[in-house]
Amino acid sequence: MEPLIHFKDADILNGENVVIYSLDMDIMPGDFVYIVGKVGSGKTSIIRTITAENRMDKGEGIACGFTLPGIKAREIPFLRRSMGIVFQDFQLLTDRSVEDNLSFVLRATGWKDRAEIDRRIKEVLKDVGMGTKAHKMPHQLSGGEQQRIAIARALLNKPAVILADEPTGNLDGETADEILQLLRDLNAAGTAIVMVTHNRAIFEKYPGRIFSCEGEHCQEVFDEGIDVTL
């Protein structure tokens, strides 16, 4: 199998500054991967490099078949359509319903047939346990419900990988557990998950591969007993 995401000797930038040197990372289909570390250690910069929000100058970098160094501006929307992205703060459009939030994304990514759009929205809402919430406005939903809608949005174009940047950061413990279980279920169904977190309890309770960011480097942790600095 080819990796969905591949870095080799890659320097990760935040603006003009290198925050992680010589990153080696392969994310394979079906993986569940945590990127962990303290605030400011470069975790989110890795995600932004994968989505081509941050440029990449040194080393090898491939995401969903797109070469990251020198990627052309016209290629970036197609790169991002090939993956699902979930944010800590949900980033739902507050002036429209759940259904209209999802319809907006589908139309923006090339869907035109109204019946197909409706069918796909119903599918993803059912997948995240929100099948009865299509008519709701975001402010009528709890934080956990809004994050489920954000995950549904990430699933719309059937991505091979979901990038989740601190998806439980604004949620209480019980709701965070529900979101983690949802992500695990999606992973069990075949979707790779790459999740940024600084919450040790999450990756201790829900095991996966772990990349630890510390001291301007990010390396995979193979010893489950190792003390990951957070």
Image (cartoon, rainbow, N blue to C red):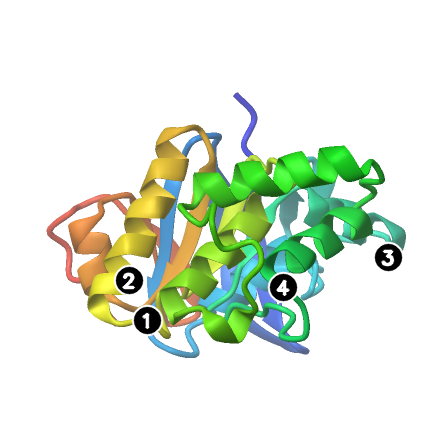
In percent of width and height, residue 92 lies at 59, 68
Q: Say which label, 2 or 1, has the lower sequence index.
A: 1
Residue in the image at 79% along x and 39% along y = 114
Q: In the figure, is residue 80 to the left or right of 7?
A: right
Q: Which residue is mark 3?
A: 73
In which quadrant of the rendered image does the C terminus lie?
A: bottom left
Disc 3 on helix, strand or loop?
helix
Q: Say which label, 2 or 4, has the lower sequence index.
A: 4
In percent of width and height, residue 225 lies at 11, 51
How many residues crowd around disc 4 within 10 Å: few (fewer than 14), some, or many (20 or more)?
Answer: some
**Of 47 and 151, the residue lying toward us:** 151
Observer-side mark, 3 or 1, equals 1
Q: Say which label, 3 or 1, has the lower sequence index.
A: 3
Observer-side mark, 3 or 2, equals 2
Q: Which residue is mark 2?
A: 176
Instruction: Determine whether 157 is above or below 198 in the image.
Output: above
Disc 4 on helix, strand or loop?
loop
Q: Amino acid at mark 3?
A: Ala
Label for residue 171? 1
